[in-house]
Amino acid sequence: MSSRFQIIVIAFILALIGLLTVWYKAMFLNIPLTPHTQKFYYTLTAQIDFQGEKAPATLSMTLPQSQNGIHIISQETETADFGYTISKTKEGERGVWSKRLVEGEQTIFYKTTLSIEPYFNAPSSSILLPNEEETQNTFMVWEDVQRKAVMDLIQKVQTYSSNNITFMARLIDELNAKEPKESVKVLLSIKDETKISLIGKILTYQKIPFRKIKGILLEDNLKNRKLTEMIETERSDGTSAYFDFEKGNIVKPDNFFIWQRGNEPLFVVEGVSKAKLRFSVIQTLAPVAESIKDHIYGEDSAFLNFSLYSLPSSEQNAFKQILLIPIGVLIVVILRILVGIRTMGTFMPVLFALTFLQTTLLNGLIMFFVIVFSGLFIRFYLSRLHLLLVARISAVIIVVIGIMSVMSILSYKLELTEALSVTFFPMIILSWTIERMSILWEEEGGHEVLVQGSGSLIVAVLTYFAMKNEYVAYLFFNFPEMLLVVLAMVIIIGRYTGYRLSELMRFTPVGR
């Protein structure tokens, strides 16, 4: 296998891995490709109003969990001066508010911010079968006539159904019929029994796995709403099926958020009166980039726990600069190998571009010229003293530091705050640049110094504009896999041995 073919294969694999990872994160993790992408978020607020009775009070409410297609970004509670804890139950978590003495009208708010994401998958919980005791004792409190009515209804529904899904759908239809059968009339007339409780008891008796769910549609400007009750069960393929108590089997809307699963009470209070729970929804449009960290990188995402967002803030800020260096490297490779621009040092322009990001371009260029020309003057004087290389470079470094100190003091006195960032200039690189320019001047003349110096500045300025671009900075920080694509491009360009653009221009008269 030739080296040329190996390079093509390696570059292709690197680029493919990088692009596929970017595609996965954009499509399935919902990370936008641009920094200004906006989307709708929903703030769902549970408002608890109650009256204190001058006694200890405890209030608990089921807390929501993320679900497939809808991700919880944040949760917070405004508890006034109540204590707040979270308790674990077999059906999830409950928020508990408590206080030793509660008096007068009180209000507690619980807010959660949600995002609709079609590809988001939340941890699932299985729907358990009713146990044998629950099945046997379902109708024991009823009279014989009532038990006979429910058996007649079950037999009829079974006749016209083929599985659990069709059984549940047919059962709901029978209970909602405009002209119900005699057995249905008997059951609906039972004291303290509702349509919802009847359906639950019949499904328990039939050993059909199900659980009640309560949720709300995520729509803008919903106020003072109650949660909608439905039933959830499992199909033979393991997916969920949903049933409305009025409509039967339905397709759950994508914007229907399930607040509670299970048979536990949604809301329990002790020591208060006139308790009322209402829900409101507000829709807002906001930049996705602002919420990427909370939105995407969670404890349940093992893949993304190794992202840059898992680092402390200081390290994140450092990598925002470091990840821009490959862009500068790519520009240097293109301009040196394909265009033919000569620079002083291979990657010195990249370092100066990073400096320009801190000082701004105009201030950086001014400082560059002042420091370099001053240093060159000192370097030419030191050459007459016949100092050794190490001593000469050391002397130039000291002079450069002195020049930078003077510029900082003058800038401060003149209130030119932008120029104070002169300290960002790499002193060692400047010193070696001055030394190299002076040696080049002696060996090749001033023309070559001008060519390489101007080439270095051109590459540094172009690199600065590339690094300064907010889209580039955003893309490489949120999709560091793009480094593989850049690496593939560098490898491919590194194999190029043809004419450079400057050489084509140089030999144009020969072609004529």
Image (cartoon, rainbow, N blue to C red):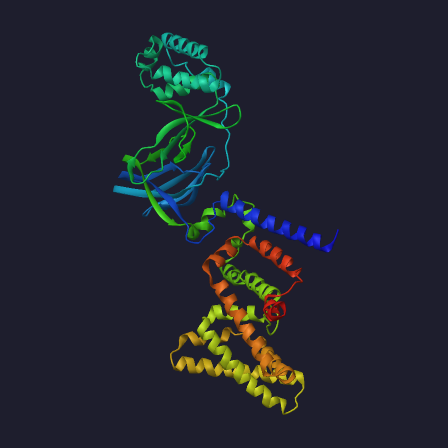
User: Which residue reaches farthest front?
Assistant: 512
Count the labels in the image.
0
User: Which residue reaches farthest bottom?
Assistant: 385
Q: Position of residue 265 (x, y in %)?
A: 38, 30
Q: Which of the 4 quarters of the picture holds residue 83?
A: top left
Q: Position of residue 85 (x, y in %)?
A: 41, 43
Quick check: can you spot residue 25? yes
Residue 328 vs 263, above or below: the answer is below
Nearest the camera: 184 or 34? 34
Q: Which of the 4 quarters of the picture holds residue 250?
A: top left
**The C terminus sits in image quarter:** bottom right
Residue 397 vs 282, above or below: the answer is below
Left or right of 47? Residue 132 is right
User: Which residue reaches farthest right?
Assistant: 1
Residue 23 vs 242, above or below: the answer is below
Quick check: can you spot residue 78? no
Q: Position of residue 197 (x, y in %)?
A: 37, 21
Please tell me which residue is depicted at 64% across the width and 58% down the height of the picture. Answer: 491
Nearest the camera: 103 or 317? 317
Nearest the camera: 452 or 280? 452
Please tell me which residue is depicted at 46% across the width and 81% down the height of the picture. Answer: 407
Q: Position of residue 41 (x, y in %)?
A: 38, 44
